Image: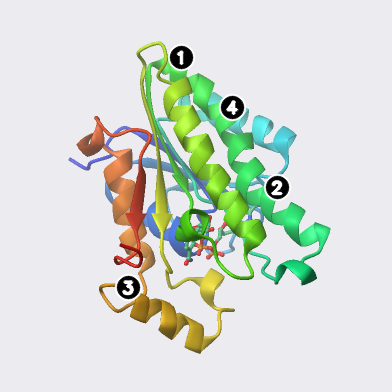
């Protein structure tokens, strides 16, 4: 039997990169998998339910989550993965670049968790996994907007771990902080910088999306029932 048998899972941003690998991994572990993104691919994965959603739109999040709950009755696991970058040195960063990243990466997670968390409280169980970043923990040149959003996610994760379990409910909230993972998001990073990042890891390589999906599976499943409020570093030992 799969590790996620009978679990209903919502993965935001599951059409590409890390989110897509999480969707595939969770399907292979027999979860019922729902995903959302702004653009729905023409080639869909069999047995995945797709919703068109911009997570920065609070009302749309409310409506979509209501639709999912009407259809499936519950959400057992939420992976709040959707995110973007809009990088620039601080002196060049526009209001729009700053606000877009905060509205999608930070407010977008709030928009989803605010409607999913209370339903988990009613059910008495649930696992929420947020995707933060090594950049939220240590900062990065040219990514002040992204660093702020990802550091904020860690603060929200710890707050929700306290809030949703306060009545003794078995609701766990954890974050995965990936290092540099080979997806479209890092494609714009210059080759020599990626080589530098790779050299900075203990394992001397960048990460694969599946390595994040494996961590998400652990936190989603009953293998981690006593783990909450943590930030799981999946970065090849980039910072020790
Ligand atoms: P990708 O760009 O490959 O995929 C991002 C996914 O999020 C897509 O499915 C995209 O679909 C979706 N998405 C983006 N904006 C929105 C939105 N407003 N509403 C709904 N869905 C949205 O990125 P990665 O897979 O690399 O990144 C996934 C997560 O991991 C992000 O939160 C990222 O910050 C984080 N991360 C990534 C690292 C890396 O090195 N790759 C390192 C550390 C953290 P669409 O555009 O159609 O909406």
The residue depicted at 42 percent of the width and 15 percent of the height is 166
- Determine crowd level at label 2: few under 14, some 14-19, many 20+ residues with C-alpha closer than 10 A: some
Q: How far apart are marks 4 and 3 (CA)?
A: 37 Å
Determine which residue is flagged by label 2.
Answer: 103
Answer whether residue 22 is visible to the viewer in this image. yes
Name the N-terminal-most of marks 2 and 3: 2
- Look at the numbered discs 1 and 4 and tell me whether their residues touch, using CB distance below 8 Å: no
Q: Position of residue 10 (x, y in %)?
A: 47, 40
- Determine crowd level at label 1: few under 14, some 14-19, many 20+ residues with C-alpha closer than 10 A: few
User: Which of the 4 image quarters holds residue 91?
Assistant: bottom right
Ligand 1 near label 2 (Cβ, under 8 Å)?
yes
Q: In which quarter of the image is the C terminus?
A: bottom left
Q: Please, which residue is most extreme toward the right here? A: 95
Q: Position of residue 147 (x, y in %)?
A: 58, 57
- Determine crowd level at label 3: few under 14, some 14-19, many 20+ residues with C-alpha closer than 10 A: some
- Look at the numbered discs 3 and 1 and tell me whether their residues touch, using CB distance below 8 Å: no
Relative to 91, does residue 164 appear above or below in the rendering? above
């Amino acid at each position: 039997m799969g590790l996620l048998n009978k679990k209903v899972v919502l993965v935001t941003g599951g059409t590409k990169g890390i989110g897509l690998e999480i969707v595939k991994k969770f399907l292979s572990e027999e979860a019922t998998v729902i995903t959302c993104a702004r653009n729905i691919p023409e080639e869909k994965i069999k047995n995945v339910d797709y919703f068109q959603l911009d997570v920065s739109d609070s009302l749309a999040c409310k409506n979509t989550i209501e639709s999912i709950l009407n259809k499936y009755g519950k959400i057992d696991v939420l992976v709040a993965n959707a995110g973007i970058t809009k990088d620039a040195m601080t002196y060049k960063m526009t209001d729009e670049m700053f606000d877009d990243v905060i509205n999608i990466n930070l407010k977008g997670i709030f928009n989803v968790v605010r409607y999913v968390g209370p339903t988990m409280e009613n059910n008495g169980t649930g696992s929420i996994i947020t995707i933060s970043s090594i950049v939220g923990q240590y900062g990065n040149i040219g990514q002040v907007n992204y660093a702020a959003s990802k550091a904020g996610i860690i603060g929200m994760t710890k707050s929700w771990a306290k809030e949703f379990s306060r009545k003794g409910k078995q609701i766990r909230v954890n974050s995965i902080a990936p290092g540099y993972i080979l997806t479209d998001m890092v494609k714009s990073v210059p080759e020599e910088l990626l080589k530098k990042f790779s050299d900075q890891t203990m394992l001397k390589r960048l990460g694969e999306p599946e390595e994040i999906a494996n961590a998400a599976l652990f936190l989603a499943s009953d293998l981690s029932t006593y783990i909450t409020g943590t930030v799981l570093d999946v970065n090849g030992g980039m910072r020790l």
